[in-house]
Image (cartoon, helix red, strand yellow):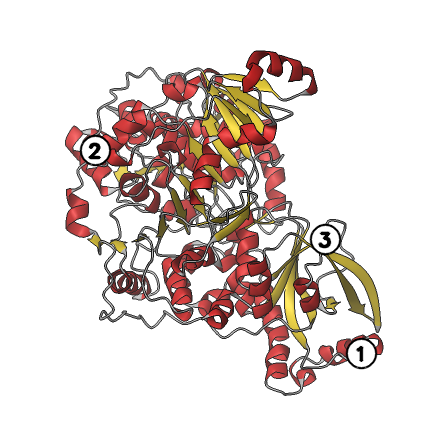
Amino acid sequence: MIKLSNSGAYLINGCEVIEATAENEALLKSKLGSKYESKEEAAKNTIAYGILADHNTSGNMDKLQIKFDKLTSHDITFVGIIQTARASGLEKFPVPYVLTNCHNSLCAVGGTINEDDHMFGLTCAKKYGGVYVPPHQAVIHQFAREMLAGGGKMILGSDSHTRYGALGTMAVGEGGPELVKQLLSQTYDINMPGVVGIYMTGEPAKGVGPQDVALAIIGAVYANGYVKNKVMEFVGPGVANLSADFRIGVDVMTTETTCLSSIWKTDDKIKEFYDIHGRSEEYKELNPGEVAYYDGMVYVDLSKIKPMIAMPFHPSNTYTIEELNANLKDILHDVEKKALVSLDGKIEYTLTDKIRNGKLYVEQGIIAGCAGGGFENICDAADILKGKSIGADEFTLSVYPASTPIYMELARNGKLADLMATGAIVKTAFCGPCFGAGDTPSHNAFSIRHSTRNFPNREGSKIQNGQISSVALMDARSIAATAANKGYLTAATDMDVEYSGPKYHFDKTIYENRVFDSKGVADPSVEIKFGPNIKDWPKMSQLTDNLVLKVVSEIHDPVTTTDELIPSGETSSYRSNPLGLAEFALSRKDPEYVGKAKEVQKAEKARIAGEDMAAALPEIGEIMATIKKTYTDVNTENTGIGSTIYAVKPGDGSAREQAASCQKVLGGWANIAKEYATKRYRSNLINWGMLPFIYEEEIPFTKGDYIFIPEVAKAIKEKKTEIQAYIVKNGEMKPFTLTMGELTDDEREIILKGCLINYNNRAL
């Protein structure tokens, strides 16, 4: 199904691939003749390079400083972003900024909190000149596809699944501080990313959907980091065989490969998408140049893709449904073993009890959100289920159209009635099932979902309360086939169905009636509405000359997700309250973390107040005494006290900045890791003034140890990549070396100032 090149590759005339190996050099020169270019020159002919060049303000394509065309956020992130920007002098949104409300849509948890955030967003859209999309109208990414995307444009969103490449828009999902920079007319600074070609051939079999293709790709490239922090560029003759909706469904899942962004060649099917949505002027034909060089090539034979399933607890844990059904006991046992790592053995977890009469029985099906809630997905699911029943047993099916216009069209063409007649429940546009705030299954239940992620807790489990359920990712078509068989796992290709393929008609009336659009005109007279849970960021200190860090958490999982660093679900109602939300930090991974971090923070607060640190944290006296034996000039004025965590590979998953900011407001000054799972998590650390240290060997310290880093501020100023540190223990100091990856000048200054807010306050 999927094959990866072992080298870079040239794409010739958009249809022929020649890998850039030594053996092929003569072939390349003879075939291309005068058109043969160096890798460096041919790399400029990718679609991605052209779009990045158009948005780069640095004049140096190796060191990009990007200004985006548009911004978008949802109601878990926009309050913190705007509060940060306000603290830094925001007066007006300088580019179109859309505030959608699709995460905290359920205004029942936490009293008035969620609707207070919505009113904050509406008044800010009025005051600063933005766009406000009320709850239940559209999930963030569907609204962006329908109303924001444009050929050759770039969009930055504070959600990791900000991906509109199928429509010719390079979109990036980042933590909130990167949007703050854009709101303050600053830039998104990155090195020129590598570009990997996704070369598609063939045509999907009947019953195979976009999630099947996406999961096959994720399974092939995630673990080996093949596209990590790179741009995935979809090319090849197979692209033409995919509808716009199909491409969108594949594209949104590229986030789960850990790539930076995505872009696709465009054609008449994408032009038709813009025509249907009344925005024909936004279409732009995009193709790579006659000879384009890619840093790698992923070969995707669409005709060989089979219905897929990503088993718990990661989208890359993939199997074909056929393979799973044929090896049911063995695969389920293997998943159970892997789960012991993900769940730290804290709770009993079984899947083999789902085997009934030799088949896998699931209790729930969900088709939802930016991945599953598309028009074609739901229409095909309705065709599979038409005239059938999901049954009256445990199995349930919920369908969430991604926007009200899609919902309206499903009502008009009868698909809504077909679904409801089966016993399925059709709900409004809402992202809840994707992050644990909607359709939580029962204890030990197994849910199959056409959504984006299946990390632990994403379905609403509370392991600390003894509650566990799990999610597998599947395509809407195979979920519908399973529903038609009343919960027994079934591939859509096993169903005899004639897909009706109704044409989509977009009706923008509901948006015209309900969406507030300032047209970019700010009204400074508007008073922002603040609910009692909306709090300002606490003051944060500058980096001191030296640092003493206590290791307050130690995580040895192969990957630590942002959901484990700051849980989703019920905590979402506290996203606008930094200190309130921080109480949940690492709660599902290390429940002792918050208390341990606060103990250390007491010492730092005492230091800042000129009080006795040892009275606040008795053990710090001995630590400081040991340090002063060697570093006699260390004192309470030049040496800060903070906490750090160690994780092997933290930051996979969501873009949420709170994974870092919660550590910061609890006194965190650093993370130490073998590597960072995503650029966006590392950026979040930096923007909150936290040092993103790397230590690739087996760690010489353990939870509870203290680490002293002398002249750390000097090391950052002098751009050192190796930083001397010491483990302070039992009256002795044991040296070891931390490393620091590349930092821009601005990033160094942000760390030195203590956070992005301080950096901008001092810049004003």
Q: Position of residue 90 (x, y in %)?
A: 36, 66
Cα separation, mark 3 vs mark 1, equals 25 Å
Amino acid carrying mark 1 in the image: Lys
Name the residue at 19% across, 46% down: 511
Is 188 located above or below residue 749 in the figure? above
Closer to the camera in the image, 454 or 181:
181
Q: Position of residue 538 (x, y in %)?
A: 48, 74
Q: Are marks 1 and 2 in contact (CB under 8 Å)?
A: no
Q: Report the side of 300 relative to 344 (left or right).
A: left
Amino acid carrying mark 2 in the image: Leu
The dot on residue 628 is: 1
Amino acid carrying mark 3 in the image: Tyr
Q: Report the side of 337 relative to 499 (left or right).
A: right
Tell me the mark number nearer the camera, choosing from 3 and 2: 3
The number of numbered discs placed on residues in the rendered structure image is 3
Is 391 located above or below residue 24 in the figure? below
Is 522 located above or below residue 601 in the figure? above
Mark sitting earlier along the chain (3/1): 1
Question: Which residue is label 2 attached to?
Answer: 410
Q: Quick one: label 3, few (<14), some, or many (20+) residues within 10 Å? A: some
Q: Quick one: label 2, few (<14), some, or many (20+) residues within 10 Å? A: many
